[in-house]
Amino acid sequence: MTLRDLRYVLALADHGHFGRAAEACGVSQPTLSVQVRRLEAELGVALFERTAKGVAQTDACGRLIGHVRAAVAEMEAIRSEAVSLRDPLAGRLRLGIIPTLAPYLLPLVFAPLRAALPGLEVEPWEDQTASLLRRLRAHELDAAVLATEIAEPDVVGRALFAEPFLAALPPEHRLAGQAVVAEADLAPDVLVLADGHCLRDQALEACGGTGALAGTLRATSLATLLNMVAAGYGTTLIPALAAGAAQDAGIVLKPLAARTGRTVRLVWRARSPRQAALAAVGEVIAGRLRGFAEAAAAGAI
Amino acid sequence: MTLRDLRYVLALADHGHFGRAAEACGVSQPTLSVQVRRLEAELGVALFERTAKGVAQTDACGRLIGHVRAAVAEMEAIRSEAVSLRDPLAGRLRLGIIPTLAPYLLPLVFAPLRAALPGLEVEPWEDQTASLLRRLRAHELDAAVLATEIAEPDVVGRALFAEPFLAALPPEHRLAGQAVVAEADLAPDVLVLADGHCLRDQALEACGGTGALAGTLRATSLATLLNMVAAGYGTTLIPALAAGAAQDAGIVLKPLAARTGRTVRLVWRARSPRQAALAAVGEVIAGRLRGFAEAAAAGAI
DNA sequence: AGGTTGTGATAGATACTGCCTATGATCGCA
DNA sequence: TGCGATCATAGGCAGTATCTATCACAACCT
């Protein structure tokens, strides 16, 4: 039973005439005649009564025609829905983002994404790197924005932009007067995020600290961390996109001597069928952040 | 897009594995692989993402799968409905019956029909011969029970039983004492039905009357006619099946000298696809009325 | 590391099937 | 009784669904 067969039946039921129904279906009269007869044989039920002057529906046809129409309608729906999904730059795109990036990156790129890719519904999902990768593999996400290298063969990606780190100091801190802060100088009283945040490891590595303070004070979000620094509990290293929020909290920011930073990447499954959409999204984000690294480094007081 | 294709998609979506889905569909893995890919090409949408360890649905698949399931369900419904309709002795059978027969024949045959053909819903429709034939040709009836010969090539039929006519007299009528009444003796004061009833013409023809009285007294139903006879307005000729009703009305019935009668027939369109059901219905009715003509002739006082 | 296992994709052969044109059979109508 | 209309049938052709056999790839497990 094919969509075609059902269309033939509907045409014949509507026209009551093999020739005209065939014309409406764009096939020859014998074709429609044979196919309808074949379907009747398949169903084991006579759907039409042929006479010399036309065609009449049987009672069985009357009982089945509703289902036939419904089936055809559903298949039409499949087709039209598919057409609307055909645009590779349309549809839902579930995008994971790490927590140290999401609150600062999303406001920047949301409007450009909507403008450049109006058909794409970007659905953000905020979680830590490991969780995002798990969800990505589980097909629960289409892509993720991370700040770590990914070395696994089934996940590929592209760099979006370089994000420098900045030294974040309480205003009264002993280093607050310097124009540039050496990473290692932050080590004694550096505060870091809780386990699982990639920024925690990156910060510790950059300043060579052990995160001694982190044992007692584990910030679960960058916002918390900023408030802790602002309150004078210690220093930290923040990604440049959070600069605005840090300054709002009353924190002093200084460029780092070694210009330490991280590379933000868009990653996705290597076999994802949505390459086009992913490329487009990557390009929009990268375009929006172009030149950001330099501006951020220069902009830090 | 065939039912088969959609089944493949559902199997693949449910099993998440080409091999097992193919097995479930009773085809080889390459077949399912190729066909799913072909359908994806037809729709222009990737439905599945193939990996080394299995298959994952794409977002597009998630959006379409509901319609796919609905379409398959509708086609299943067509199939199962067709199976239940397949029994030629099942379904609705719209049966026309002439008014001079219906009230007396239906009570006799309804129970036997239900017993012999439990799947058949016989739907009676009472009307005069010409109207029944019109509806029969218009496919608004499947068959009709008539008391006239039909000479048209597109309508065929079979005799069900012979129905004798009986002389119906008021008890005080001059002929009421005779054992047998000659048809012609009824002519002077014969009452007949309104135009359109076949019994009217048959009665007039049998007794050779002109229906003079009928000009002023036109009974529109046999019940009315019986009451008129019982009230002494005249005589008439009634079909034997109405004997009971006539006697209940206080009418005297006598056999006719020439044993005039009519043949009751079941007729249907020559090309009707329900030959089996019609044959069965005819057989049940004929069987129920077997020997009726003799019993009726003998039973009349 | 390197074979083993399991996955889906591909190739080539075969049989089926849907389609066309041409023609036939039947019926109604003038 | 021929004519027009209707649906059915026949034969040939092309497209396609299917099979088996095999490949390519990745994961896994010694």
Image (cartoon, coloured by chain):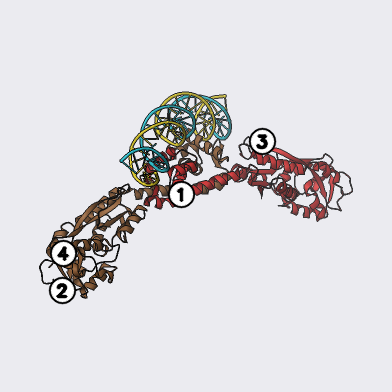
Chain colours: A brown, B red, C cyan, D yellow
One can see residue A218 in this view:
no
Helix, strand or loop at label 1? It is helix
Give the CA distance from mark 4 to mark 1.
Answer: 54 Å
Residue placed most toward the observer, A225 or A101 = A225
Residue placed most toward the observer, A129 or B173 = A129
Helix, strand or loop at label 3? It is loop
Say whether residue A291 is left or right of residue B284.
left
Query: Are labels 4 and 3 assigned to the same chain?
Result: no
Query: Are labels 3 and 1 assigned to the same chain?
Result: yes
Helix, strand or loop at label 4? It is helix
Q: In the rendering, which numbered label is found on residue A183?
A: 4
Residue placed most toward the observer, A242 or B3 = A242
* Label 3 or label 1, whichever comes before in sequence order: 1
| Image position of A93 with respect to D6: above or below | below
Query: Are labels 2 and 3 assigned to the same chain?
Result: no
Q: Chain of mark 3?
A: B
Q: Looking at the image, which residue is at 23% across and 58% down?
A: A112
Q: Amino acid at mark 2?
A: His
Q: Amino acid at mark 4?
A: Glu
Which residue was labeled with disc 2?
A173
Q: Looking at the image, which residue is at 46% across and 46% down?
A: B11
Q: Chain of mark 2?
A: A
Say whether residue B103 is left or right of residue B58.
right
Label 3: few (<14), some or many (≥20) within 10 Å?
Answer: few
Which residue was labeled with disc 3?
B151
Which residue was labeled with disc 1?
B14
Query: Are labels 2 and 4 assigned to the same chain?
Result: yes
Tell me, yes or no, whether the two marked residues, 4 and 1, touch with CB atoms within 8 Å: no
Give the CA distance from mark 4 to mark 3.
Answer: 111 Å
Tell me, yes or no, whether the two marked residues, 2 and 3, touch with CB atoms within 8 Å: no
Q: Tell me residue B8's x, y (percent).
A: 45, 44
Q: Amino acid at mark 3?
A: Ala
